[in-house]
């Protein structure tokens, strides 16, 4: 299923924030988690995640630090800030509004 | 195992990929490290899934996305990175932080030394006051250029047996300009003394140039790089001087407000010491930032070549139309000398920024038009002067100005010839570049002749 570029881009922010709400994480793990959650339907170009993360960091929604993993690999870990948590809540409300609106019309428009 | 031998090992591939990524201006060191960690995770996961190393690498790179699209995204998020910043940050691992710090310290020490040097004569009764003006005018370049030279001797790690000749040149210059028995007029320096003061920096600038290219004057593009350096240094110096002017004005103004006259402080310390130190700081800035900041001299050249061409053509047309002769004033020769200097500068800096392999374009035609119109204007002026030179007599100023005019005329005439050949496809642009760089010592040699020979020839008047 092709979700289209705009929809993928629009969903990136709430998705990343929500995944980071589960706990501190790094780029590769976030991408893997997106794959699991969407059952492979949401295909990101891996590299594109990083400008998104940097934008969220600039807006103060996430904070980052460099840390070595148990295996000794240095990775940049991101975690949600307080503002990020507030924003996540706002995002959730927005998407639920869209979802609820669409749901009300789906049943009439294409009853399948 | 033969398959493994055919393909470069994983580390090497990652190394190449990293180097390629580093060249993107929008993606900085930490970003590269972050993306590399991602790449390694991905490769590791794919290998565990049963792929060979090189296959895993290819897929992982593909999944990261095309580098063009990626750096576009990074540029959108980090637009400030596209503005080159004038900060003291080293570029990746090319320049280790300690080396940069040592260089900064050396630069500061040399700048301080130059600032102190201008105050030393004051300890021996030669204060910076009007009556010692001629002394400071003659020696101005000797207070600062040895330190610029020292900076490059240090930076290029020149061997003592090479740089000792540069030191000899400075000592010789100091001896010559300070032992000549110049005539003492009541009104400032004598003519030959003023000529010395004017020409010594030009002659000594070649010494700086030899240090700049690390003693290898004839190798590679060293001379053209020195030309580029000189132009950029000039621009930096003007900018620093503007800032210094603001600082001086504020100093005087603020002390004035509490009733203290600070002019002497500005005149005796701030301005002379600042003017000396700024040359070193400017040189260091040009050196440190040569890859960071776009060169300004070629940009100014592009801007002013058409304007100067238009002015010269309009001048020629007006002269032909109104049939007004050139009014031979005392300084008319100097004015036309300066015109030729500007035109040679425009040609030189256009050449310094041009890709020698590129085919002729409109700008090259414009350059030729500029040179030819300058040559015509100067020839008209020379004829006007030559017809009356016997009336004026051969003063040192006039001989020096005439010599300079001829030197610049020869340069431009041959440049025009080479440009024309290039535009007709009969020659390479490199010939013009080679001519310009080969001509550099001629200016310095003439300046040295004026310094050394003119005072005795004209009896130190």
Image (cartoon, helix red, strand yellow):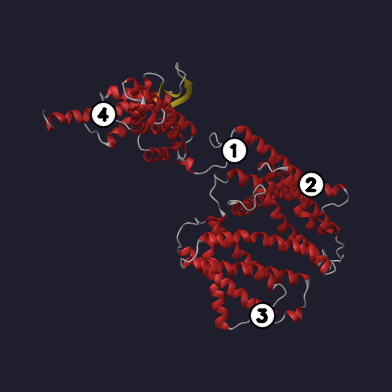
Q: Position of residue A25 (x, y in %)?
A: 40, 21
Residue that numbered label 4 is attached to: A97
Distance Cα–Cα, label 4 vs label 3: 88 Å
Q: Are marks 3 and 2 in contact (CB under 8 Å)?
A: no
Q: Is residue B227 visible?
A: yes
Q: Position of residue A49 (x, y in %)?
A: 37, 31
Residue that sits furthest to the left in the current view? A111
Label 4 marks a residue whose chain is A
Q: Position of A38 compared to B361: left or right?
A: left
Residue that sits furthest to the top in the current view? A70
Quick check: do tags 4 and 3 share a chain? no
Element type at mark 2: helix
Label 1 Cα neighbours within 10 Å, binned few <14 / some 14-19 / many ≥20: few
Distance Cα–Cα, label 1 vs label 2: 27 Å
> Which quadrant holds residue B41?
top left
Distance Cα–Cα, label 3 vs label 2: 46 Å
Distance Cα–Cα, label 4 vs label 1: 50 Å
Q: Are marks 2 and 4 in contact (CB under 8 Å)?
A: no
Residue B117, disc: 2
Label 2 Cα neighbours within 10 Å, binned few <14 / some 14-19 / many ≥20: some
Quadrant (top left, top right, bottom left, bottom right) of the N terminus of chain B: top left
**Residue depth check, mark 4 versus mark 3: number of the one nearer the observer:** 3
Quick check: do tags 3 and 2 share a chain? yes
Residue that numbered label 1 is attached to: B88
Q: Residue at x 62, y 74 (%)?
A: B378
Q: Position of residue B100 (x, y in %)?
A: 62, 36
Distance Cα–Cα, label 3 vs label 1: 55 Å
Residue that numbered label 3 is attached to: B384
Distance Cα–Cα, label 2 vs label 4: 76 Å
């Amino acid at each position: 299923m092709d979700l289209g570029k705009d929809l993928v881009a629009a969903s990136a922010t709430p998705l990343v924030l929500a995944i980071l709400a589960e706990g501190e994480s790094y780029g590769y793990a976030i991408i893997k988690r997106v794959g699991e959650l969407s059952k492979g339907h949401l295909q990101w170009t891996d590299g594109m995640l990083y400008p998104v993360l940097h934008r969220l960091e600039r807006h103060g929604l996430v904070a980052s630090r460099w840390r070595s993993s148990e295996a000794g690999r240095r990775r940049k870990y991101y975690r949600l800030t307080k503002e990020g948590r507030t924003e996540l809540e706002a995002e959730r409300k927005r998407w639920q509004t869209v979802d609820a609106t669409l749901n009300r019309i789906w049943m009439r428009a294409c009853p399948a | 195992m033969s398959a493994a031998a055919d393909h470069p090992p994983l580390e090497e591939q990652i190394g190449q990929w990293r180097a390629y990524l580093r060249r993107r201006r929008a993606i900085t060191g930490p970003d590269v490290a972050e993306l590399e960690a991602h790449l390694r995770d991905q490769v590791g996961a794919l290998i565990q899934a049963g792929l060979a190393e090189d296959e895993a690498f290819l897929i992982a790179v593909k999944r990261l996305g095309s580098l063009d699209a990626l750096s576009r995204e990074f540029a959108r998020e980090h637009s400030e990175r596209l503005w080159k910043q004038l900060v003291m940050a080293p570029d990746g691992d090319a320049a280790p932080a300690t080396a940069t710090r040592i260089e900064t310290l050396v630069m500061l020490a040399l700048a301080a030394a130059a600032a102190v040097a201008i105050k030393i004569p004051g300890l021996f009764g030669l204060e910076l006051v009007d009556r010692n003006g001629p002394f400071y005018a003659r020696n101005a370049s000797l207070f600062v250029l040895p330190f610029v030279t020292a900076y490059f001797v240090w930076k290029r790690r020149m061997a003592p047996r090479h740089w000792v000749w540069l030191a000899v040149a400075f000592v010789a210059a100091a001896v010559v300009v300070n032992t000549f028995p110049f005539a003492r007029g009541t009104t400032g320096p004598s003519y030959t003394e003023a000529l010395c003061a004017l020409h010594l920096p030009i002659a000594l600038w070649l010494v700086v140039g030899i240090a700049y290219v690390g003693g290898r004057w004839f190798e590679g593009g060293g001379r053209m790089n020195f030309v580029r350096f000189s132009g950029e240094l000039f621009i930096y110096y003007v900018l620093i001087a503007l800032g210094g002017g603001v600082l001086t004005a504020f100093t005087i103004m603020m002390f004035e407000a509490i009733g203290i006259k600070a002019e002497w402080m500005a005149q005796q310390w701030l301005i002379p010491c600042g003017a000396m130190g700024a040359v070193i700081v400017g040189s260091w800035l040009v050196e440190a930032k040569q890859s960071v900041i776009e060169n300004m001299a070629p940009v100014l050249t592009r801007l002013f070549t058409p304007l100067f061409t238009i002015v010269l053509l309009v001048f020629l047309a007006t002269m032909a139309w109104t049939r007004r002769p050139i009014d031979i004033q005392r300084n008319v020769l100097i004015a036309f000398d300066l015109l030729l200097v500007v035109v040679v500068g425009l040609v030189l800096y256009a050449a310094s920024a041009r890709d020698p392999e590129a085919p002729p374009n409109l700008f090259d035609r414009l350059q030729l038009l500029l040179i030819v119109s300058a040559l015509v204007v100067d020839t008209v002026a020379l004829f006007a002067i030559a017809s009356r030179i016997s009336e004026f007599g051969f003063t040192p100023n006039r001989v020096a100005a005439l010599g300079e005019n001829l030197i610049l005329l020869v340069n431009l005439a041959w440049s025009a010839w080479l440009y024309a050949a290039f535009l007709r496809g009969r020659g390479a642009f490199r010939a013009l570049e080679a001519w310009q760089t080969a001509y550099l010592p001629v200016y310095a040699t003439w300046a040295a002749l004026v310094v050394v020979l003119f005072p005795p020839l004209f009896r130190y008047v």
